[in-house]
Image (cartoon, helix red, strand yellow):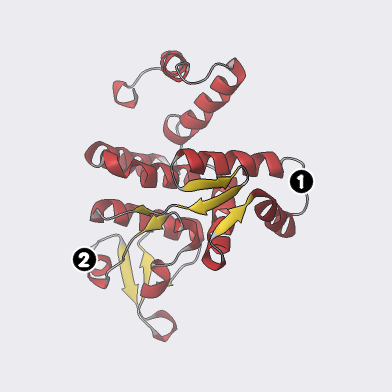
């Protein structure tokens, strides 16, 4: 539908028709449509270039859709990215995550907010639908890492991970362990980083580091 360059009203109509096969509630359908349109359709100076690369990769490597869609959700919705960073930290030290533990960690970081519990639940359910999380019980999840083996997709994922993490410089080791990229099983090679034009190699901090080109 994006390739058809439809005007907004027509695009919404087609989205409603498509989503209605899975969503009965008009309110839920509208909210889902708007989330997807924020990710892919509505003009955004910050996202447009990344969207173009993402769509090219989705066309070429549809089997890697989860990794690409995850990055786009994180870029569009900061709260999604923040919850996923926290989840990545929790999974580094334990094999499962529970909604209460995640909620408590969010309360510790952000203070108690009324919408946090519902937001967290929606994010965990989204990750479950993407097969990143799998249920042990209703509110207990284990991690199912998704392999990212295609170099073009891996470069996209690493680039977005660096943007989302927010640091200026990353060592080779750090790029292999970004919390925001916890859903993925991947290996970064120095050769890949050195051969890809989007990175700059420096000697920051007395060791070889990489930063994104402006």
Camera-near label (1 vs 2) is: 1
Quarter of the image with the C terminus in it: bottom left
From the viewer's perspective, is residue 208 above or below residue 13?
Answer: below
Q: Which mark is residue 100?
A: none
Above or below — where is 31 with respect to 168?
Answer: above
Residue drawn at 44 percent across, 13 percent down? 17
Residue 27: x, y in percent? Answer: 61, 19
Disc 1 is placed on an element classified as loop
Give the residue number, with chain letter if any, for mark 2.
195
Residue 88: image location, x then y, percent: 53, 59
Nearer the observer, 202 or 121: 121
Q: Residue at x 76, y 46 (%)?
A: 113
Q: Mark 1 sits on what residue?
A: 113
Please say if the residues under marks 1 and 2 sit with CB atoms less than 8 Å apart: no
Q: Quadrant of residue 176?
A: bottom left
Residue 133 in the image, given as x and y percentages of width and height? 49, 47
Name the residue located 39 percent from the left edge and 74 percent from the top edge: 173
Pointer 1 or 2: first along the chain? 1
Decide: few, some or many residues near mark 2? Use Cα within 10 Å; few <14, some 14-19, many ≥20.
few
Whether residue 190 sits left or right of residue 169 in the image: it is left
- Can you see residue 171? no
Q: Inspect this view and state whether residue 95 appears.
A: yes
Q: CA distance from mark 1 to mark 2?
A: 45 Å
Task: Rate crowding at label 1 as few (under 14), some (14 to 19) or many (20 or more) other CA atoms within 10 Å.
Answer: few
Q: In the picture provided, is 85 more to the left or to the right than 39? A: right
Camera-nearest residue between 172 and 49: 172
Q: Secondary structure at mark 2?
A: helix
Q: Quadrant of the N terminus?
A: top left
Q: Residue 47: image x %, image y %?
A: 43, 42
Report the number of numbered marks.
2
**Residue visible at 58% across and 23% down in the picture:** 28
């Amino acid at each position: 539908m994006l390739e058809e360059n439809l005007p907004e009203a027509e695009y919404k109509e087609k989205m409603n028709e498509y989503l209605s096969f899975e969503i009965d509630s008009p309110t839920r359908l509208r909210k889902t449509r708007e989330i997807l349109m924020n990710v892919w359709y509505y003009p955004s100076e910050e996202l447009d270039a990344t969207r173009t690369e993402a769509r090219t990769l989705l066309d070429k490597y549809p089997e890697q859709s989860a990794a690409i869609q995850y990055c786009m959700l994180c870029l569009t919705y900061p709260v999604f990215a923040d919850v996923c960073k926290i989840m990545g930290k929790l999974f580094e030290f334990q094999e499962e995550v529970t909604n209460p533990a995640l909620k408590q960690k969010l309360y510790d970081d952000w203070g108690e907010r009324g919408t946090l519990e519902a937001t967290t639940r929606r994010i965990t359910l989204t990750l479950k639908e993407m097969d990143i999380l799998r249920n042990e019980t209703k509110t207990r999840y284990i991690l199912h890492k998704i392999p990212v083996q295609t170099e073009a997709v891996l470069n996209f994922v690493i680039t977005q991970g660096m943007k989302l993490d927010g640091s200026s410089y990353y060592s080779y080791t750090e790029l292999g362990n970004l919390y925001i990229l916890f859903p993925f099983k991947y290996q970064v090679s120095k050769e890949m980083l050195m051969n890809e034009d989007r990175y700059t190699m420096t000697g920051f901090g007395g060791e070889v580091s990489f930063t994104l080109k402006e």
